Each structure stands twice: as C-alpha cells, then as structure tokens.
Image (cartoon, rainbow, N blue to C red):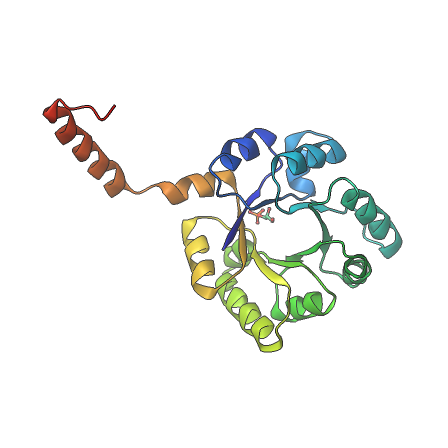
Amino acid sequence: MKIFLDTAELSEISRLNETGLVDGVTTNPSLIAKSGRNILEAIADIAAVVSGPVSAEVTATDYETMLAEGRKLAAIADNIAVKVPLTPAGLRVCHSLSRDQIMVNVTLCFSAAQALLAAKAGARFISPFVGRLDDLGADGMGLISDIVDIYANYDFATEVLVASARGPQHIVDAALLGADVVTLPPKVLDQMYQHPLTDKGLDAFLQDWAATGQSIL
Ligand code: G3P
C-alpha cells in the first residue's frame, strides 16, 4: 500500500519524508490556502522534496480553463498529478490530460458510479472521501470495497486512493480491502506508530538493560 501525505506544509512533508515511508503527496485548494503560499511555488517545492506523485488541484470549473490550469500545473515537474473534481467537465479534462500521458487524480468522489466513470476517463488515481461519508453516517469503507471490486472486475488501471482518512483504523480498513493508496494528514501517520504496550515494553527493556551496566558501543 502506498502512503501519501495530505498536506501542503513543506516542513511536515520534509520531516516525514525522512522516514522513507512517504510515497507521494496530495494537496487541494483548502490545503494550499492553509499553507499561505503561492500554489505554483508550493507545489514546485513539494515536488522537489518528494519523488512520488504530487497532486495539485485545478480551481476552475469549466473545461477550457481547467485544461489550461492542468497543463500549467503538470509543467511544474514530472511527478505532478493534476487533480480534477468529479464533474462532467472534470472528467473531460481527465480524458484529455490522460491521453497526453499526464497523471490525473480525480477527487471529490462519493459514489461507485462516479468512480466507474473516472476509471473510464483514464484517471491514474480516484480519490473517494471516506471521512466525509462517515461524517454523514454513510459507509465510507463500503464505498472503497465496491470500487475495489468494480475495478478488479474490469482490470481498470486506476489506483484507488483513499482520501479524507481520519485515523489509523481508516488506514487498516483500506489495507484490508486492498486499496492501492491512502492519503493521510501528518498527524495520522504519527498516530500509526503509537501503541502504549510498545512504550511500556521498551521502558522495561531499557531498565533491565541499564541494570547490566553493559554498553554495545
Ligand atoms: O484529500 C482530501 C482531504 O484533504 C479531505 O479531507 O478531512 O477535509 O475530509 P477532509
């Protein structure tokens, strides 16, 4: 399973990229706004730090302008994935950019029907938002299960990129379903390391070791 960081904060991306566990980054207009940076500069800096796919989202809603924005974003670096919304115009842009070998991440997916269309449009990634579905009392992971099954039925190359993940259990559930990628806030990656029994066990090991008076180095 690939792990992408869902943030535009370069300091957090640099920090966690050093773990060797980060396979890419996703951003969106809200995350760019939160960073306070110019989108073109922020994406260029992120793409220079992380070698995997870096998603940068268009902000127009009409075909022509989204296409122009997408080409400009794709030109920033070779590892840019252009993010487009799951709308008729967005999927037309996806089809056009994919035809030109540009990676497209189709975002704001909330149904299996939408995901089916995105795969047919040539998306490299589909981003179903599990957390926002759960927020409404819907079954976010049920959608992931349906998409994984549908894509397997037709051998679609589109990768299921689980988005809007709110905690480690979302990551585990996505992995159990065979999702290709999960994108998560930095805090969720930090949480995945943590277990109280690990801390307790390490403390006990180190106390017993200290009593030996030995040193490995
Ligand atoms: O990549 C989409 C993600 O940023 C949305 O997360 O928590 O706002 O639903 P959230």
Residue sticking out furthest to the left: 211
Up-down relation of residue 76 to residue 126 (above or below): above
Residue at the far right: name it.
64
Q: Using the image, determine if residue 47 lies above or below residue 206.
A: below
Q: Give percent across and percent down for residue 182.
A: 53, 53
Say which quadrant the C terminus sits in: top left
Q: Residue at x 61, y 69 (%)?
A: 112
Residue 99 as seen in the image, left or right of residue 85: right
The spot of residue 190 in percent (x, y) is: 43, 39
Q: Of residues 50 and 204, which is closer to you in this image?
A: 50
Q: Is residue 201 above or below residue 133?
A: above
Does residue 65 appear left or right of residue 117 in this picture?
Answer: right
- What residue is shown at x 85% (from left), y 54% (from top)? 62
Number of labelled discs? 0
Residue 78, image x, y percentages: 72, 44
Q: Residue at x 74, y 41 (%)?
A: 77
Residue lying farthest to the front in this orientation: 217
Q: Position of residue 94 (x, y in %)?
A: 77, 59
Q: Nearer the viewer, residue 196 or 77?
A: 77
Q: Tell me where residue 210 sits by quadrant.
A: top left
